[in-house]
Image: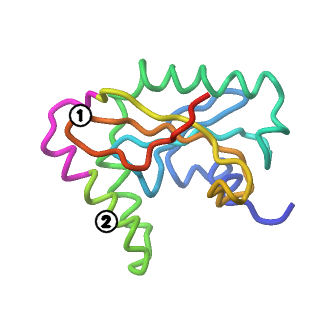
């Protein structure tokens, strides 16, 4: 299999996993497309959604709902974005810019209230999939903040 960044994240918890059950974990995206963007990843190494068990696949949606409706407002996004900025190399301007943008937005808003969200998988090299470990993106949308990176096809 070789090195897998997501397997390392799960093993070391360097990215502050905020949810974990026996199948999946959730963590705040290091390069958020919008404030509150998080990932859900299987604990075992799985490279394709087609290799997920039925139980794992169904659990993705359950975890997304659980996080969005029960945990989202308790996640300290500022602390996590500051942590990611500290981890980022100076050359990784995209991570630094997106995390700073998220921090600025959060300091202006007293309460995060997404008006919607996009969630989905990238599968196959033509989809923009960058990592060989399945993961679901959950990207909140806000009426006053453009979410130009949302998924066009939802499951």
Q: Is residue 31 above or below residue 138?
A: below
In the rendered image, the residue lying farthest to the front is 152
Q: Nearer the viewer, mark 2 or mark 1?
A: 1
Locate the C terminus and report the quarter of the image it occupies.
Answer: top right
Asked if the residue at tag 1 contacts the one at tag 2, i.e. Cβ–Cβ closer than 8 Å, the answer is: no
Residue 143: mark: 1
Q: Quadrant of residue 85?
A: bottom left
User: Which residue is pictured at 33% across the width and 40% down the height?
Assistant: 76
- Residue 58 rendering spot, x and y as whole percentages: 70, 21
Locate the N terminus and report the quarter of the image it occupies.
Answer: bottom right
Does residue 145 belong to the magenta stretch?
no
Left or right: residue 23 versus residue 149 is right
What residue does disc 2 label?
A: 97
- Residue 73 rendering spot, x and y as whole percentages: 32, 27
In the structure shown, which secondary structural element does the residue marked by tag 2 occupy? helix
User: Which residue is pictured at 42% across the width and 19% down the height?
Assistant: 69
User: Which residue is pictured at 63% across the width and 41% down the height?
Assistant: 121
Mark 2 or mark 1, which has the lower sequence index?
Answer: 2
In the structure shown, which secondary structural element does the residue marked by tag 1 occupy? loop
Q: Is residue 19 above or below residue 28?
A: above
- Residue 117 rendering spot, x and y as whole percentages: 42, 31
Question: Who is closer to the viewer here, 97 or 125?
Answer: 125
The residue range painted magenta reads 103-113
- How many marks do you count on the picture? 2
Label 2: how many residues lie within 10 Å, few (<14), some (14-19) or many (20+)?
some
User: Which residue is pictured at 28% across the width and 45% down the height?
Assistant: 146
Label 1: how many residues lie within 10 Å, few (<14), some (14-19) or many (20+)?
few
The colour scheme used to paint the residues is rainbow
Q: For the residues marked 2 and 1, what is the alpha-carbon distance in whole angstroms?
A: 21 Å
Residue 124: mark: none
């Amino acid at each position: 299999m070789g090195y897998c960044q997501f397997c390392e994240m799960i093993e070391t918890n360097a990215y502050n996993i905020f949810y974990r059950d026996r199948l999946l974990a959730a963590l705040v995206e290091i390069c958020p497309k919008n404030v509150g963007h998080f990932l859900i990843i299987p604990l075992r190494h799985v490279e394709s959604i087609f290799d997920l068990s039925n139980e794992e696949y169904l659990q993705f949606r359950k975890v997304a709902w659980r996080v969005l409706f029960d945990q989202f407002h308790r996640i300290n996004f500022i602390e996590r974005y500051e942590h990611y900025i500290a981890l980022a190399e100076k050359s990784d301007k995209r991570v630094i810019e997106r995390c700073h943008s998220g921090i600025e937005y959060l300091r202006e808003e007293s309460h995060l209230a997404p008006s919607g969200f996009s969630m989905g998988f990238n599968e196959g090299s033509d989809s923009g999939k960058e990592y060989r470990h399945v993961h679901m993106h959950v990207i909140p949308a806000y009426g006053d903040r453009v979410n130009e990176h949302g998924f066009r096809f939802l499951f």
